[in-house]
Image (spheres, coloured by chain):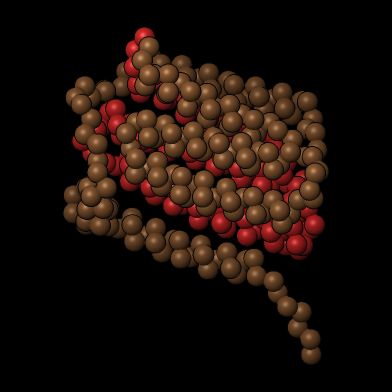
Chain colours: A brown, B red
Amino acid sequence: MNGSTIIFYLLAVLTLGCGLLSVITRQIFRAAIYLLFALIGIAGIYFWMNYPFIAAVQIVVYVGGIVVLIIFSIFLTQQTGEQLPRQKTGRKLFSALAAASGFGFTLLQVMHFDFNESAGVTAVPTVQDIGNNMLRAGDGGYALPFEIISMLLLAAMVGCIVIAIKHKEITL
Amino acid sequence: MMQPGLYEILVISSALFFIGVYGFLTRRNLITVLMSIELILNSVNLNFIAFNKYVWPDRMDGLFFTLFVIAIAAAEAAVAIAIIINVYRTHRSIDVERTEEMKY
């Protein structure tokens, strides 16, 4: 067992442990902080797989953007120090059963499927490759999805403003 | 002991996916439901990157799909939080049991 393997399993334990705590804790602010560490663990796994660009995007967008957004919305909507109501045991039991059986079936399929793994040394795509392919329209290029995503982000931004805006009472 | 490979990462991502499903089924607060959805989307991203690295290392499709999924997740979280804040303003609660009518 070498250092790389130990780091991988530490990251796996961090991700899964924080993810599990994030869905079972009864304090919503703690749930957000556990979610933050689970996302950092996933970014660590991306670093471990030698994809530093994706890891950087994960940290910038998820850890820096979405979790901060979630924490702000918790501040806006929750009373401080209030715990979430306890769930019914039957509901918890059946949800756990459904999740565990789904996990078991998926695991069974994954373990019996022979993936056609490529044996060669993996070439790590550089940021330059990513940029060239993202803005190219030909074979292997992703110019069209890039444009569609930019339109989607613009629409989402305008939509957020329209939804969350406070309507003034019209006084005549 | 072998170096961890594709199967170990698939086990992690499916475990994370079903943790998210469990949270989605048990939580009754809209913000925590949104957190569970983020966990599910992250497990899918992990799958894309693992397949890109171990099965098609000469292509970059999984990498681009991960980038697009991250962008869509950011847009989705922003719209969802705008809706949640609006629901809180009208209903004074973001519990899914208490927000039954669509129009206030």
- Total tally of numbered discs in the picture: 0
Residue in view at x 39 percent, y 35 percent = A46
The percent coordinates of residue A162 (x first, y second) are 60, 69
Position of the C terminus of chain A by quadrant: bottom right
The percent coordinates of residue B26 (x first, y second) are 69, 34
Vertical comparison of B17 with A153: above or below: above
| Residue A77 position by quadrant | bottom right
Extreme residue toward the bottom, this view: A172
User: Is residue A88 something one can see in this rendering?
Assistant: yes
Closer to us: A151 or A51: A51
Vertical comparison of A170 with A85: above or below: below
Residue in view at x 69 percent, y 43 percent = A29
**Apparent side of residue B30 relative to residue B52 in the rendered image (left or right):** right
Extreme residue toward the top, this view: B1
Residue in view at x 23 percent, y 24 percent = A118
Closer to us: A19 or A115: A19
The percent coordinates of residue A131 (x first, y second) are 26, 53
User: Is residue B43 something one can see in this rendering?
Assistant: no
Residue in view at x 29 percent, y 42 percent = B61
Position of the N terminus of chain A by quadrant: top left
The percent coordinates of residue B23 (x first, y second) are 64, 34
